[in-house]
Image (cartoon, helix red, strand yellow):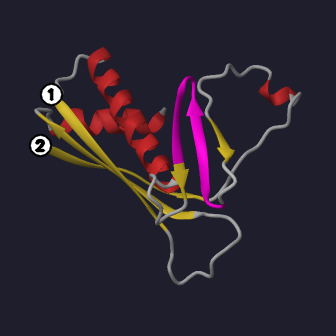
Amino acid sequence: MTFVEGLKTVCNTITSYKKGDSSMAALALAYEARSYSTGIVGRSICNARNHHWVAENTGGEAVGAGELFCASVAACAVNMVETIADKEQRALDRMEVSVAAYRDADKPAGDVSIYDAVRVQFQMWNVTDDDARFLVKTWKQR
């Protein structure tokens, strides 16, 4: 097993575009998901294509929105790195990616949820150290 530290970054900006914004004209839609209120504060119904699931604030019965964020980044990393390894003909038997989002407990709570840091850890089996570093570096650049 090879361990490679992936991404340490601060997530504190959101870019939004208005319909008809010319800067979006050259972009093709890659993915889309939605979330709808349920009438219960802190609970929403999410969907992507024909799949639906419940998301909650922390502490609820359903998976929390922050947990879904972490799971999405982890799934993207696993799928992309395996694809890169396959295309680049790099040996990789299997991998696990863990994502954790952090907040500064000493900061006053704001009106918006902001992560002060996001840590992505890669564990890879039957891959050389050089190949593992290459795969994570390539993933970070995409």
The part of the image, by quadrant, that contains residue 57 is: bottom right
The part of the image, by quadrant, that contains residue 122 is: top left
The circle drawn on residue 93 is: 1
User: Relative to residue 97, is residue 34 drawn left or right?
Assistant: right
Q: Secondary structure at mark 1?
A: loop
Magenta: predominant secondary structure element?
A: strand
4 in magenta: no
Give percent across and percent down for residue 123.
21, 44
User: Relative to residue 7, is residue 94 drawn left or right?
Assistant: left
Q: Give the amino acid type for the residue marked by disc 2 in the picture.
A: Met
Residue 63, above or below 129: below
Identify the residue at image location x=50%, y=70%.
103
Identify the residue at image location x=36%, y=28%.
79
Give percent across and percent down for residue 16.
76, 43
Residue 88, above or below 109: above
- Disc 2 target residue: 1
Give percent across and percent down for residue 49.
57, 23
Read off the magenta span: 41-54
Residue 13, above or below 107: above
Q: Give the amino acid type for the residue marked by disc 1 in the picture.
A: Asp
